[in-house]
Amino acid sequence: QDDIRTPKQRRVDAFTEIVYKSLDEGKLPQHNGVRPHITITTTLEGLKGELGAAASELETGMPISSKTVQR
């Protein structure tokens, strides 16, 4: 038992892995004919990860890192 994560953290990590695998494979189910999507607002500088660039954000207004945008 080398895994020191809490049960809660293991569940979060497992869910995150499922989401990433689904997105990577491009085989997400359709709901009423529309595939799930996310909208990100960023600048070219933010996409490049340049220092001092304005923060990128999701359509909900939640800020996200340049690394996340690049993924």
Image (cartoon, rainbow, N blue to C red):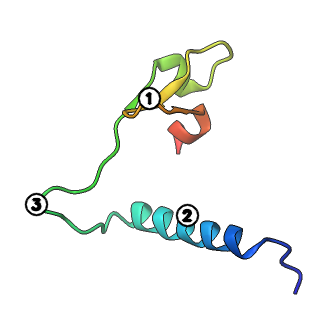
Write the residue at 15% across / 55% down: 34
Q: Nearer the viewer, mark 1 or mark 2?
A: 1
Residue tagged by mark 1? Answer: 61
First in sequence: mark 3 vs mark 1: 3
Do the CB atoms of the residues marked 3 and 1 lie less than 8 Å apart? no
Mark 1 to mark 2 CA distance (whole Å):
21 Å
Residue tagged by mark 2? Answer: 16
Q: Dot 3, crowdedness within 10 Å: few (<14), some or many (≥20)?
A: few
Q: Dot 1, crowdedness within 10 Å: few (<14), some or many (≥20)?
A: few
Quadrant location of residue 15? bottom right
Residue tagged by mark 3? Answer: 33
Q: Estimate the x, y position of residue 2 in percent, counting from the top left.
A: 89, 81
> With respect to residue 71, does 18 lie above or below?
below
Write the residue at 72% across / 76% down: 7
First in sequence: mark 1 vs mark 2: 2
Q: Quadrant of the N terminus?
A: bottom right
In this view, which residue lies farthest toward the right?
Answer: 2
